[in-house]
Image (tube, rainbow, N blue to C red):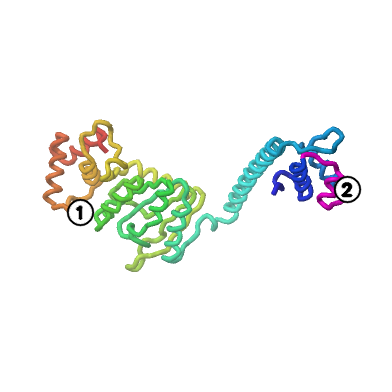
Amino acid sequence: MLEAAGLDEVTERAYRLLVRAGEAEAADVAEELGITAEAAAGALATMRDLGLVRDAGGRGFAPVAPDVALGPLLMRRQESIDWARQAVEQLAEEYRTSLRRRDADRLIEVLPSRAALREQVRHLQNSAREEVMYFCRAGHVVMPSQDNTEELDALGRGVDYRVIYERALLEEPGMVANVAYGIKLGERARAVRFLPVRMMIADRATALLPLVQHAGGRTETTAALVRGSSLLDALIALFEAQWDRATPIRSLDDGQVIDAAAGCPLDADELYLLSLLVAGVPDKSIASQLGLSLRTVQRRVYHLMRRAGAQTRMQLAWHAARERWL
């Protein structure tokens, strides 16, 4: 049990004997452990060198308190292990870098089937530790957004999700409620009119995206898994650029995620409606997904315009941006 402290089996048994007995000579150790006198003398010499025993004034050897003797020893060994681990990680990174230079195929792995793509979507989210960045386009390839239970599990682990939705996707049945639920759990969501590609990036280390969107009238499932490279850096930069220009989407739950500026006169429902309007979701889609009549939605929009002193919806969006309501 004490191999980590540098004690072999015989030395550990001898030390345990001294701890129990209080003090002993080499002959006593040899007799009690059933070993030769030479082996007992060697074990005592090893313990003396490690600072585990002290001379008992002519009565053999007495043990040094285990926490005093072994604590610093284990600390030094732990430091050595930590340094060795760092060296191994550095060597591993150098190995991977060298391997990438020699074999570019390892940078991009082609996934030839829907099943392989679905498995990678699942794996990347289950293995994510810090952040997942997502481009969500209209029309699913592998699965509907509602079936992505891996995101819910990752959010529960504290993984940061930043998701950009294509506006057409928000018009699909059930998506507004689905997005609101994700935001309530911690997802940070924004919307843009158009996204160039579907994409997922996990921990800024691996990206997953389809290679061909459609072929011959059917959805093509071929995708690419992109690992650390200049190409991955470019994909991360693409996401960040889209994120900066995208419109935030707020949740219905005021206590969870709405972060409008202090003094904002709108309540949670009004902020949610405003965020959908600014994101470009049509009134008809908002009404059908929220279970409201089109007239009710238009009446609430008119109420928002009056609150902002705006004559048009464009003025409403400008006022919301100036006052940092969103």
In this view, the residue in front, 38 or 23, is 23
Q: Earlier in the sequence, mark 2 or mark 1?
A: 2
CB contact under 8 Å: marks 2 and 1: no
Residue 60 at x, y percent in the picture: 84, 38
Residue 99 at x, y percent in the picture: 60, 53
Q: Amino acid at mark 1?
A: Ser
Other residues around mark 2 within 10 Å, as few (<14) / some (14–19) / many (≥20)? some
Element carrying mark 1: helix
Which residue is at a point 71% across and 47% down the rendered structure image?
Answer: 2
Which residue is at a point 41% across and 53% down the rendered structure image?
Answer: 153
How many dots with numbers?
2
Query: Which range is magenta?
Result: 22-38
In this view, the residue in front, 25 or 281, is 25
Q: Tell me: 2 left or right of 144.
A: right
Q: Nearer the viewer, mark 2 or mark 1?
A: 2
In this view, the residue in front, 259 or 162, is 259
Q: Is residue 69 above or below residue 282?
A: above
Which residue is at a point 24% across and 31% down the rendered structure image?
Answer: 263
Q: Which residue is mark 1?
A: 285
Residue 277 at x, y percent in the picture: 21, 45
Q: Is residue 182 magenta?
A: no
Q: Residue furthest top?
A: 263
Q: Which residue is mark 2?
A: 37
Q: Tell me: 164 left or right of 45.
A: left
